[in-house]
């Protein structure tokens, strides 16, 4: 993200808090697969931070890049975004970025900018599942 922000001249704000809150939110859901119940809780926890930051910065609307992933249907992400937006007093832009060849384009752009594409979603549990799953070691 830092590499891309530098390449395109975009300011990057990194939220360094929230790990304890996230861990508490997903407690008991550690063994859920990616796409399971843990992810709905995760979307809400993460998007609450984004919504609060949007309000703090005076942005009326915020969105998320989560929907670029084929594993993140808009129908699962949007309810969390809208709930987070309502709580923070901003609006959520429910955009499905994977559509109109968006995912393929994201792969092209990551190659163009030399960006690393990790094989797991983002949390320690998704990393564990990739490391121990049927495709481990590929
Ligand atoms: S990081 Fe990804 S796999 Fe892990 S809980 Fe969040 S959405 Fe699900």
Image (spheres, helix red, strand yellow):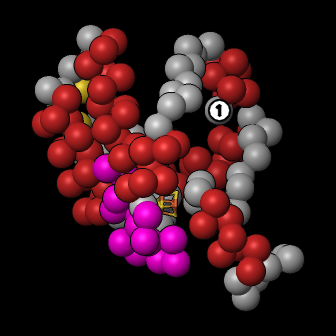
Determine the image quadrant of residue 122. bottom right
- The x and y percentages for residue 43 are 37, 52
**How many other residues sit within 10 Å of disc 1, few (<14), some (14-19) or many (≥20)?**
few
Q: Which of 26 and 131 is in front in this view?
A: 26
Residue 137 can be seen in this image: yes
Residue 123 position (above or below residue 15): below
Q: Is residue 112 a member of the stretch shown in magenta?
A: no
| Whether residue 67 is visible | no
Q: Is residue 41 magenta?
A: yes
User: Which quarter of the image is occupied by the N terminus?
Assistant: top right
The C terminus lies in quadrant? bottom right
Residue 47 location in percent, x, y? 35, 41
Observer-nearest residue: 42 or 20?
20
| 20 and 12: which is toward the camera | 20
Q: Is mark 1 within 8 Å of ligand 1?
A: no
117 or 134, which is in the foreground? 134
Image position of 117 (left or right of 35): right
User: Element at badge 1?
Assistant: loop
Magenta residues, as a range? 27-44
Q: What's the residue at 45%, 49% (across, down)?
A: 22
Q: Where residue 104 sits in the image (x, y, percent)? A: 57, 56
**At x 69% / y 43%, what residue is drawn?**
110
Q: Residue furthest bottom?
A: 134
From the top left corner, tell me how far across and down residue 124 is, in percent: 63, 60
Q: According to the image, label 1 marks what residue?
A: 1
Residue under the image location 69 percent in, 70 percent down: 128
- Position of residue 116 relative to residue 4, above or below, is below
Total of numbered circles in the picture?
A: 1
Q: Residue furthest right?
A: 137
Q: Considering only vertical position in the picture, is 90 above or below 48? A: above
Please indicate whether residue 40 sits to the left or right of residue 69 in the image: left
């Amino acid at each position: 993200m830092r590499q891309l922000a530098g390449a395109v001249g975009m300011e990057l704000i990194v939220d360094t808090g929230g790990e304890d809150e996230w861990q508490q939110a997903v407690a008991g859901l550690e063994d859920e697969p990616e796409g399971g119940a843990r992810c709905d809780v995760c979307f809400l926890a993460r998007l609450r931070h984004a919504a609060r930051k949007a309000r703090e910065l005076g942005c009326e609307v915020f969105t998320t890049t989560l929907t670029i992933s084929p594993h993140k249907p808009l129908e699962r992400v949007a309810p969390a975004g809208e709930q987070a937006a309502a709580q923070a007093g901003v609006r959520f832009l429910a955009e499905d970025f994977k559509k109109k060849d968006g995912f393929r384009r994201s792969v092209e752009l990551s190659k163009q900018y030399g960006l690393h594409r990790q094989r797991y979603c983002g949390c320690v549990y998704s990393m564990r599942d990739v490391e121990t799953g049927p495709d481990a070691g590929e």
